[in-house]
């Protein structure tokens, strides 16, 4: 079992490294061209592998941190990629069962994170702030999905906006994992939330830049 864990860990770390490199490249370079799409494919597959293997590892050695990052990563990368196939969602395009499955699964875990955060607060455990933050973000993203799936978005290109938001969010998850694992100076809560504080503003800037109202 330990050998299996070491193999999973190697693949998890290797895929995560590729995700960090490709994600950084697509954040700093021109968006939408052929190279962006090619690099994006490497980012997508590496982050899916990283997230799935990370969650499998928690079965062998329970690790709440790794599980949260894993579920978050898979959801954001998967839905971010799926939205590229939903270019007509603002006009009533029918979404597939996989889209509903991804959203309802994230809703389930998001509510679970919030409930667990309350239990940690009762024990005066500051990690509850991290769980509450990720739980609320999860629920808000899922509610946004439900609105978009029903064609109620006010934006014509909601598919592009969500793609940008989710892929950047997945990069935040990868950066957070790297920082938390290698952190030796910052308080744990700061290490968990710092990437979000630094990168989330970019999501708002890019969304505003590309937004096309109906």
Image (cartoon, helix red, strand yellow):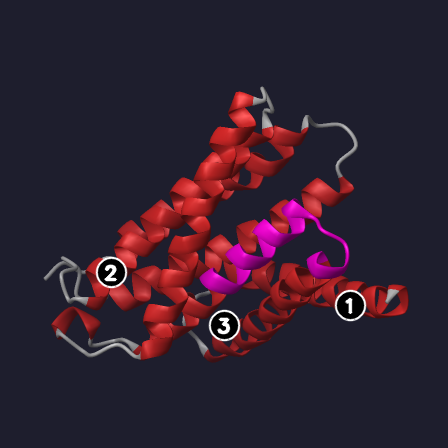
Q: Nearer the viewer, mark 3 or mark 2?
A: 2
Q: Report whether 17 appears left or right of 201.
A: right
Task: State which tag comes first along the sequence, 1 or 3.
Answer: 1
Can the viewer see residue 1? Answer: yes
Q: In the image shown, does 78 or 131 lie closer to the viewer?
A: 131
Q: Which mark is residue 36?
A: 3
Extreme residue toward the right, this view: 3
Taking the magenta stretch, the answer to whether it contains residue 75 is yes
Q: Residues within 10 Å of mark 2 (few under 14, many from 20)?
A: some
Q: Which mark is residue 158?
A: none
Q: Report whether 195 appears left or right of 142.
A: right
Quarter of image, res 214? bottom left
Location of mark 1 (residue):
8
Q: Position of residue 36 (x, y in %)?
A: 49, 72
Give the vertical position of 12 relative to 91 (above or below).
Answer: above
Give the vertical position of 214 relative to 205 (above or below).
Answer: below
Whether pointer 2 and pointer 1 mark residues with C-beta atoms closer than 8 Å, the reply is no
Distance in Å between CA atoms under marks 1 and 3: 29 Å
Distance in Å between CA atoms under marks 3 and 2: 28 Å
Span of residues in magenta: 58-76
Can the viewer see residue 202? Answer: no
Secondary structure under the numbered disc 3 in the rendered image: helix
Distance in Å between CA atoms under marks 2 and 1: 34 Å
Task: State which tag comes first along the sequence, 2 or 1.
Answer: 1
Q: Which mark is residue 146?
A: 2
Identify the residue at horizontal 70%, vertical 60% (top origin): 59
């Amino acid at each position: 079992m330990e050998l299996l864990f070491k193999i999973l860990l190697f693949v998890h770390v290797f895929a995560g490294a590729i995700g960090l490199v490709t994600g950084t490249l697509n954040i700093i370079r021109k968006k939408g061209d052929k190279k962006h799409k090619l690099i994006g494919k490497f980012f997508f597959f590496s982050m899916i592998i990283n997230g799935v293997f990370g969650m499998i590892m928690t079965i062998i050695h329970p690790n709440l941190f790794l599980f949260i990052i894993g579920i978050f990563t898979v959801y954001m990368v998967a839905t971010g990629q799926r939205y590229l196939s939903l270019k007509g969602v603002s006009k009533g395009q029918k979404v597939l069962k996989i889209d509903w499955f991804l959203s309802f699964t994230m809703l389930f875990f998001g509510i679970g994170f919030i409930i667990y955060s309350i239990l940690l607060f009762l024990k005066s455990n500051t990690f509850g702030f991290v769980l509450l933050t990720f739980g609320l973000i999860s629920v808000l993203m899922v509610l946004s999905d439900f609105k978009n799936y029903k064609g109620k978005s006010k934006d014509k290109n909601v598919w592009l906006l969500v793609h940008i938001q989710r892929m950047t969010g997945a990069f935040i998850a990868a950066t957070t994992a790297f920082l938390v694992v290698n952190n030796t100076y910052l308080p744990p809560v700061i290490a968990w939330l710092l990437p979000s504080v630094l990168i989330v503003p970019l999501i708002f800037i890019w969304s505003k830049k590309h937004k096309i109202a109906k």
